[in-house]
Image (spheres, grey):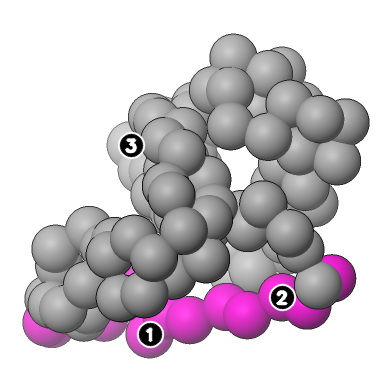
Amino acid sequence: MYHWLTTALFLGVVQATSLGRHCEAEFIQAVLPSNATVLYALPQSNGASYGDQNIAYPLNATDLPAFCAVLVNVTSSPTSSFTFGLGLPDEWNERYLAVGNGGFSGG
């Protein structure tokens, strides 16, 4: 249901990073709609290990290329919101990978 929104947000963030403002939360926030909030944008160095501990993905990815870890929260209604993360590589090969389980992790 929210795939179109996360894709649009992803493209907005890609636009921000393509303008040379790779890992600045304020700049990324400026290209997102008003119902989306950047929770963080953290630069990660080459060879880093990274992950947000959660039920669906309990282990961190390792030996990663340099990238910007971005976490965005989107208010989808007065009583609902969702959060998604992006790993934006310093050198992007113009490919896109999405993972998830449709919101039923652990349920």
- List the residue tagged with mark 3: 79
Name the mark nearer the viewer: 1 or 2.
Answer: 2
Q: Quadrant of the N terminus?
A: bottom right
Magenta span: chief secondary structure: loop
Secondary structure found at label 1: loop
18 falls in the magenta region = no
- List the residue tagged with mark 2: 96
Q: In which quarter of the image is the C terminus?
A: bottom left
Task: Specify start and end residues of the magenta stretch as a single range.
Answer: 94-107
Give whichever of discs 1 and 2 has the lower sequence position: 2
Horizontal relation, residue 104 to residue 22: left or right: left
How far is the residue under mark 3 from the one under mark 1? Answer: 22 Å
99 falls in the magenta region = yes
- List the residue tagged with mark 1: 101
Three-letter code for the amino acid on which mark 3 is drawn: Thr
Secondary structure found at label 3: loop
Three-letter code for the amino acid on which mark 2 is drawn: Tyr
- Image coordinates of residue 96 in percent, x first then y, are 71, 75
How far is the residue under mark 1 from the one under mark 2? Answer: 17 Å
Name the mark nearer the viewer: 2 or 3.
Answer: 2
Quarter of image, res 28: top right
Secondary structure found at label 2: loop
Quarter of image, res 17: top right
Q: Which residue is drawn at 13% across and 77% down?
A: 58
Three-letter code for the amino acid on which mark 1 is drawn: Asn
Pick whichever, 33 or 54, lies toward us: 54
How far is the residue under mark 2 from the one under mark 3? Answer: 30 Å
- Image coordinates of residue 63 in percent, x first then y, are 36, 75
